[in-house]
Image (tube, rainbow, N blue to C red):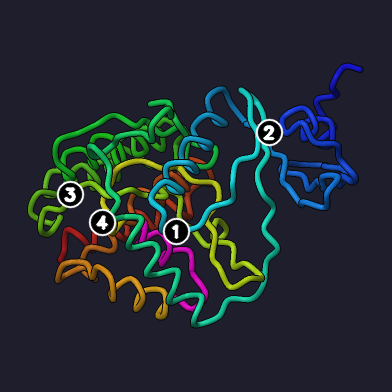
Amino acid sequence: MAERDDDPGQVAYRLTGRPVSGARAASGWPAAVTLDDGTPVMVKRGHAPGAVAAEVAGLRWLAAADAVAVPAVLGHDEHWMVTERVPTGRPGPQAALRFGRALAAAHAAGAPRFGSPPPGGPADAFIGLAPMRNAPGRDWPGWYAEHRVLPYVRAAVDRGTLDAAEAAVFERVCARLPELAGPAEPPARLHGDLWNGNVLWGADGVVRLIDPAAHGGHRETDLAMLRLFGCPEWDRVLAGYDEVAPPADGRRERVGLHQLFPLLVHAVLFGRGYAEQALTAARDALAG
C-alpha cells in the first residue's frame, strides 16, 4: 500500500522498520507514535528542502559531544525524521545544575570555524522557519555581523518591519562589534535555537534539547537566547554552567549583542514587536 503523506504511523514503520501499535492523528507535526514494543517516538515532517538533513546532522553533532542529551534519531529520509519521544517532568534545581554543566561541556566540544555546519549538514539550514546560512568566518565579530545580524536586518527591511534609518542602527552596532565583543574565544558547538521550548525537562531528571539550528558560534549566544525567552531554574542553569566554564568578565553587558540574532529572526518571522526589542538592544549596546 502506498504511504499516505499524512499518516505518521506509516512513516514511522517505513523509517524504523518496526511495526506500530498506536499513533495519534496529527493535525500538525510532530506526531506521537508508539512502536510495537512500547517505544514512544515522534514523527516530524521537514518544512522545507534541507530542513531534515540540517536537524538530523545537528542532533548527531550535539550527541557526539557526549555532554548535553538529545533524543536519538531512529530513522530519517529527505522529508521525514523519527526520534525518541521524551516523557517530560517538572523542572528542578538539580536537573538545572546538571543541564548547565552539560551545556558548558557541549560548547567546549567546539567547532572548526564560526559558522561551520555540523558534519553532513547543509550550509543552507534553518532557525525555526527562517533560513540560516552556515558560512564559515575567521573571527566572531565579522562573522556575526555578516551572517547572523545583517541578513535578518535586510529581510526585515524588505518586509517593511524595519525602515532604513532603523537598519542603520544595526549597521552601526556591527561596525563596532570588534570593540564590543569582549575577549576572543574559539568557536563553540552551539545548539543555535536555544529557547525554552526546545528544552525538555525529562521525567528521569535529564534535560534534553530538541530542534537545533546547530553551528559553530559564540557560546554566549546560546546563553543569551535561553535567557531572552525565559528558562525555568535559570539561576541554577547558569550556576552549573559557571562551575565548568564561566564566560569572560563583562558578559552581562554583552547579552544584548548576542540577543540581536534571535530577536531579528523573530522580527522577520513574527513582526514589529520583536523589531522594537532588537532596536532597544542595539541602542543599548551603542550607548554602553
| Residue 219 point in image, percent of width and height | 29, 56
Query: Between disc 1 and disc 2, whose residue precedes?
Result: 2
At mark 2, the secondary structure is strand
In the rendered image, the residue lying farthest to the front is: 37
| Residue 259 point in image, percent of width and height | 34, 56
- Taking the spot 80% from the left edge, 32% from the top edge, the residue there is 13
| Residue 258 point in image, percent of width and height | 29, 55
Amino acid type at image mark 3: Pro
Residue beneath label 2, please?
Answer: 45
24 sits to left or right of 211: right
- Taking the spot 36% from the left edge, 49% from the top edge, the residue there is 190
Image quadrant for the N terminus? Answer: top right
| Label 4, label 1: how far apart the Cα atoms are | 25 Å
Residue beneath label 3, please?
Answer: 186
| Mark 3 surroundings: few (<14), some (14-19) or many (≥20) residues within 10 A | some
In the rendered image, the vertical position of residue 251 relative to residue 268, given as above or below: below
Magenta-highlighted residues? 222-234
Total marks in image: 4
Residue beneath label 4, please?
Answer: 257
